[in-house]
Image (cartoon, helix red, strand yellow):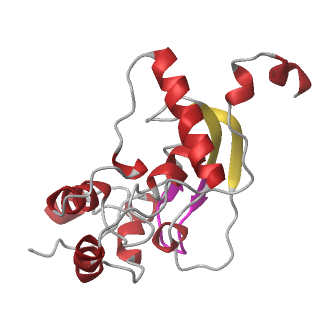
Amino acid sequence: MASIKRDAVKQKWEETEFPLVCETCLGDNPYLRMTSEPFGKKCKICETPFTVFAWQAGTKGRWKRVEICKSCAKAKNVCQVCIYDLAYGLPVQMRDKILREEGVKNTSAMLAVPQSDANRSWFNAQQQRMIESGEGEGGLTAAAHAKLQSVARMEPRYERNLAKLCSFFAKGECNRGANCPFRHEMPKDR
């Protein structure tokens, strides 16, 4: 590992021991076996390589893996897997829409990431500095906080972790039987 850290670009690569995830993504089983792959993937936001974690979410759950790096998740206060807000349990798009409607503009969670490499690395350094100093937190108005609290979904929803329905089973044509990775249940109309 010492040779990797000598390169100035690779010093910014992220190494972590545990992901930043919500209770729903961890699943209902308190005993997890988690795999990690150092520098296994580039972050979908900042394109920095980071440690990839994977685990089975619950006893009947699908395999989950992190999608964004921990620094981006901390900056935006979201789960690394489902990209839901950690404080309110909402999708990020819904949270940002409510914050815009309430007139909140200067939170680090709503800032757009620059597209060029030089600007992106400067932006990441600024975000990291804000996280370390604790500046990026707060900035919510009382009205925005009240509205977010009213639509918050904080109880875990483990049904999100279940395998997808088998479309062939619904048609009566699935020939995999017990080896099928999908759920063998009839779909419920919404």
Reply yes or no: does residue 60 show up in magenta.
yes
Indicate left or right for 36 with 177 as reference.
Answer: right
Q: Look at the picture and state if 47 lies above or below 53.
A: above
Across the whole image, how many numbered discs are drawn on residues?
A: 0
For this rendering, which residue is in front, 61 or 86? 86
Q: Quadrant of residue 157?
A: bottom left
Span of residues in magenta: 54-65
Q: Quadrant of residue 184?
A: bottom left
Give the percent coordinates (x, y) of residue 50: 63, 37
Pick the front one: 89 or 112: 112
Above or below for 178 versus 50? below
Could you tell me residue 116's position as x and y percent?
42, 16
Please, is residue 97 above or below residue 47 in the view? below
Image check: 7 left or right of 39? right
Determine whether, in the image, residue 14 is placed left or right of residue 114: right
The correct choice, above or below, for 141 with respect to 131 in the image is below
Rendered residue at 36%/42% (across/down): 111
